[in-house]
Amino acid sequence: MQTKAILFDMDGVLIDSAPAVERVWHKWARQHGVDPTHAIQQAHGRRSIETIRAIAPYMDAEQENTKVEQMEIEDKEGVTALAGAATMLRSLPPDRFAIVTSATRPLAVARLGYAGLIVPQNMVTADDVVNGKPFPEPYIKGAALLGVAPADCLVFEDTPAGVAAAQAAGMRVIALGNTYPAHELQAADARVNSLLDVRAEVRHGTIVIELADMNAAKSGLDS
């Protein structure tokens, strides 16, 4: 695959924050009489304010979102960099990639710090959009931030909502199987187990992406 720019989702792609996410949403749900399992299912890959609106439309979403964000910032246990993430980010010129996350900027900066990863110069967060994933707005803004057309971007995602957002923006997507089973990521152009299976190299101004086993990555979508 060749591309001009790469857009990374953060949680589940670069960072393993699943234990913290599930602890926070489980605690919040129990406090408000909401089904914790349903809350956690809705939370992955979406802005927290949209999760609250979906599962508890009778609540003051902005007020509750502030509480959830602070809980997430304070919960750093088990927040670590996923395999291959640091190497991948170091292999790319800073102006050729961005992080596009459903986390707020303070939460994203906190988690990147907990995981020991760089805070990139280009980042689109929950604070920067009106409609988060699965709407295309986050990824369209990511492309604009880098000064490239959406069709010239390649996205790394781990959730159905993220894959849908990227494809609605007209981008190709490589899905990582860190959060959802393969059959829920079938819409992606390819799937890999982790960023260890991906090599990125800049050749004559173009980013060339090589997957460890392209055929296996594609066939994995049918498993």
Image (tube, rainbow, N blue to C red):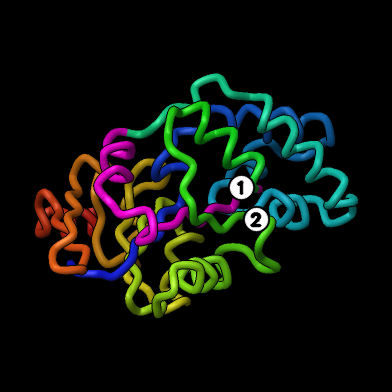
x then y, percent, for residue 83 = 29, 33
Residue stretch in magenta: 83-104
- Taking the image as shown, residue 4 lies to the left or right of residue 11, namely left
x then y, percent, for residue 17 = 51, 33
Residue under circle 1?
Answer: 103
Up the image or down, 86 lies above or below 49; here it is above
x then y, percent, for residue 153 = 35, 70
Asked if the magenta segment contains residue 15, the reply would be: no
Residue located farthest toward the top when viewing the structure as drawn: 77
Task: Identify which residue is drawn at 50% across, 35% down.
Answer: 112
Residue under circle 2?
Answer: 126
Task: Identify which residue is drawn at 84% across, 36% down.
Answer: 32
Up the image or down, 168 lies above or below 118; here it is below
Mark 1 and mark 2 in contact (Cβ < 8 Å)?
A: yes
Task: Identify which residue is drawn at 32% across, 49% down.
Answer: 176
Is residue 184 visible to the viewer in this orientation of the structure? no
As shown in the figure, which amino acid type bears the numbered disc 1? Answer: Ala
Is residue 204 visible to the viewer in this orientation of the structure? yes
x then y, percent, for residue 158 = 40, 51
Q: Circle 2: is it few (<14), some (14-19), or many (20+) Cα within 10 Å? A: many
